[in-house]
Amino acid sequence: MPRRIALLPLLLSLTLGPGSSHAQADDVATLIAAAQGTYPAAQLTEMCVAIHQATATPAQNLALLQKLGVHCVRSDNLWVVIERVGSAGSYDWSGYDAFWIPLCKAGLKPIMLATYNNPIYAARAFAPIAGGINIAAFSNFAAAMANHYSSICPNMAEELFNEPNAGNWTGVPWSGASYASMLAPVSAAVKAAQSRVAVYSGGVASDPGLDSMAWIRQMAGAGPKFPGVDAYAFHPYSFDPRNLAATLPPEQLLIDAKAFAQAAASSGQGKPVALTEYGFPLPALGGDLAKQGFYAARGMLAAIIGRYPLLTYYDLIDDGTDGDLENTFGLFRNGAFHTPYEIKPAGIAFAAIMDVMARASAYTIAFDPAISVPTISFDKPEGAAIVIWTYDTKGTKSYARQIGSFKHVSCKDVLGKTYPCAYANGTLSMSLSESSGPIVVTARK
């Protein structure tokens, strides 16, 4: 779940006690235009949040998640913590039960990361899972996880390792072909244990210097088949930690996720793509908290346009209080902040998109290519919620569109600020710019 070495101490404390394509805007426009149409609400993207379990208590985590209205939660189940040295073959879930059981009882879908290696069966915890004994032991662990949690969390998913193409979590590169030789038997073991548990391949990182497309192509084409895998996981980050000024807009997700899906399918083993990590650290956006909120919302909307089954925002809570890159992704402030667990603009924006999705019976994607303005309209019993934005940074757009007959229409940005708009004779109009962020229109019958 964490992306860089900076978070290793956080993970180890439990043990001890982007290669994005730089596509042109026209490519984004083509993909949005192709997505136009009306769809049932059942096809909406599940919106999830990643959690580092040590940043809050289970009760605090649940309260924050419910404030956002999320559908699901992604977090690590560390193999080395659950099957400890000296207790081979025995699994202690108690530390993780305290985290997962309240979430599952509250109806949240869990995405449980089976991570990383285990020094009982390998040279170290951060090493590729390879060799018959190591793979068999990991199969047993993943199957035991399914058996332990499936009755408590009937909608659970398991993600088999985190960013297997990145050296952060293996110390040495793990080839796509080597990972495939682990994925096939382990996914089969999980399905044999509990067939209803969803299985995702390990989320492939898109960090600079990593060719995620070549890696997934090699993995899917290595020879082993994956009938037990329900989706390939992908992390479509669009910022470069070495060059934060080169951060690409959220709609880049559409380009990169499609390329990833096509690369995986090139071997004939195409599957849905689950976006199991995505977000923006504050320094990648010039320290602009409002922009971080706008980008969070636009990423969610892009996933809906791409009709991806799942998007996981990284992450729930800032991991620290200083300006280190890894401490600024959160939707809420760290507990050590002077206002502990204060919601950030990114959290407000996330909750705003969750609110427009809630209770929808259907949704319609429309696009005005002349002004680069996508629109998603959500049909609701009380009327409609319409989200309008532009990704074009070149000036202000004059937007006008027939939305139907309503008794009352109001407009706010995703941070909750009233936004000027006009509604007359069924037509909604406003001025719109990329810096104004997505606008939420509430239309009541």
Image: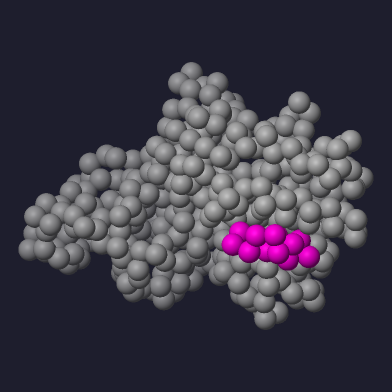
> Is residue 297 found left or right of 258 in the rendered image?
left
The percent coordinates of residue 423 (x first, y second) are 12, 56
Q: Quadrant of residue 244?
A: top right
Residue at left 59%, top 36%?
99
Residue at left 28%, top 51%?
440
Viewer-proximal residue among 21 and 304: 304
Q: Indicate whether 317 appears above or below 213.
A: above
Q: Quarter of the image for the C terminus: give it.
A: bottom left
- Decide whether the magenta segment is chiefly helix, strand or loop: helix
The percent coordinates of residue 303 (x first, y second) are 47, 60
The percent coordinates of residue 243 (x first, y second) are 63, 47
Viewer-proximal residue among 61 and 173: 61
Viewer-proximal residue among 79 and 165: 79
Q: Indicate whether 377 appears above or below 326.
A: below
Q: Residue furthest top?
A: 338
Residue at left 57%, top 69%?
272
Viewer-proximal residue among 416 and 70: 70
The percent coordinates of residue 332 (x first, y second) are 48, 33
Q: Visible in this render: residue 54?
A: yes
Q: Is residue 189 magenta?
A: yes
What span is in magenta? 185-197
> Is residue 69 found left or right of 232 in the rendered image?
left
Q: Is residue 70 magenta?
A: no
Q: Indicate how the structure is coloured in the image.
A: one colour
Q: Quadrant of residue 30?
A: bottom left
Q: Visible in this render: residue 433?
A: no
> Is residue 323 found left or right of 393 in the rendered image?
right
Residue at left 71%, top 71%?
226
